[in-house]
């Protein structure tokens, strides 16, 4: 222990009402500092509304998986009827639906080893272990069906409505050297085609074009 600490610590303990009381006070301060640090770390890595990992965490997890030799596919999930819920029942009801959908995504993803994250608004991303396209599309279709199932939503104190948070999904299978941004861009193109064709899910394929009027939602990541 440094000399100055050896001098100051007994003084601090004595000032706190004696050694026993001083040690107890120091332990409380230490636990409080640890709890604050853990909370700050959690807030930096998660979406506060849904509790899901955020886009920063999604990027980091993708990079970690690739570095470990575990290719990751991406499924971009966008709710179809979210605006109607917000417009009809208000933002609180919309937030409740987002939280419920997040729970469904997280639970369905865990069954296949996928990580569900919230990118923002009504858009989520699933990081899935890479597999052949047929397997991926089957997995994603099952998750989409889970998300789209009827959802009771308490919109007022004595009023519960049944909503159907249907989802459109764009899927991108990783190619060698694909960055996270590359996968999100491809999944975003596939998502646009899923929405425009009403197919529910769509798999990115080389040559898939972005319409001039379509503005993607990919994040700046590498």
Image (cartoon, helix red, strand yellow):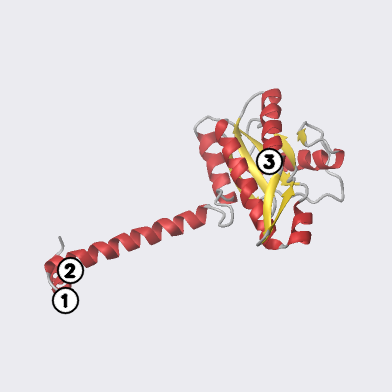
The extreme bottom residue here reads 15
Label 3 sits on a secondary structure element that is helix
How far across and down, in percent of the image, does residue 32 sit? 33, 63
Does residue 51 appear to the left or right of 84 in the view shown? left
Label 2 sits on a secondary structure element that is helix
Does residue 113 appear to the left or right of 142 in the view shown? left
Per the image, the residue denoted by label 3 is: 147
Q: Quadrant of residue 37?
A: bottom left
Mark 2 / mark 1, whichever is N-terminal: 1
Does residue 36 appear to the left or right of 63 in the view shown? left
Label 1 sits on a secondary structure element that is helix
Per the image, the residue denoted by label 1 is: 15
Check if mark 1's residue and mark 3's residue have beta carbons within 8 Å.
no
* Residue 120 in sight from this viewpoint: no
State the separation of the CA atoms marked 2 and 3.
Answer: 53 Å
Q: How would you rate the neighbour count of disc 3 (Cα within 10 Å): few for under 14, some for 14-19, many for 20 or more?
A: many
Does residue 214 appear to the left or right of 130 in the view shown? right
Q: How would you rate the neighbour count of disc 2 (Cα within 10 Å): few for under 14, some for 14-19, many for 20 or more?
A: some
How far across and down, in percent of the image, does residue 93 sit? 68, 58
Q: Which of the pair 18/148 is nearer the observer?
A: 148
On-image quarter of the C terminus: top right
Note whether 156 is above or below 187 in the view shown: below
Mark 2 / mark 3, whichever is N-terminal: 2
Q: Quadrant of residue 182?
A: top right
Number of the label disc, if any, that sits on residue 22 = 2
Check if mark 2's residue and mark 1's residue have beta carbons within 8 Å.
yes
State the separation of the CA atoms marked 2 and 1.
Answer: 8 Å
Foreground tag (1 vs 3) = 3
* Residue 144 in sight from this viewpoint: yes
């Amino acid at each position: 222990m440094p000399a100055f600490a050896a001098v100051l610590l007994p003084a601090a303990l004595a000032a706190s009402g004696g050694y026993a009381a001083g040690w107890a006070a120091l332990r409380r301060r230490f636990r409080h500092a640890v709890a604050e640090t853990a909370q700050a770390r959690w807030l930096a890595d998660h979406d506060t509304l849904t509790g899901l990992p955020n886009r920063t965490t999604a990027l980091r997890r993708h990079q970690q998986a690739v570095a470990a030799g575990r290719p990751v596919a991406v499924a971009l999930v966008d709710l179809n009827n979210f605006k109607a819920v917000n417009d009809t029942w208000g933002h609180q009801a919309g937030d409740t639906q987002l939280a419920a959908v997040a729970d469904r995504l997280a639970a369905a993803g865990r069954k296949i080893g996928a990580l569900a994250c919230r990118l923002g608004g009504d858009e989520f991303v699933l990081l899935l272990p890479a597999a052949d396209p047929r397997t991926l599309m089957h997995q994603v279709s099952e998750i989409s069906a889970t998300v789209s199932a009827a959802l009771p939503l308490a919109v007022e104190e004595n009023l519960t409505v049944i909503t159907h948070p249907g989802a459109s999904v764009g899927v991108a299978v990783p190619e060698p050297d694909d960055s996270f941004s590359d996968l999100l861009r491809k999944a975003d193109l596939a998502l646009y085609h899923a929405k425009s064709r009403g197919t529910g899910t769509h798999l990115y394929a080389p040559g898939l074009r972005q319409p001039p009027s379509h503005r993607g939602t990919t994040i700046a990541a590498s």
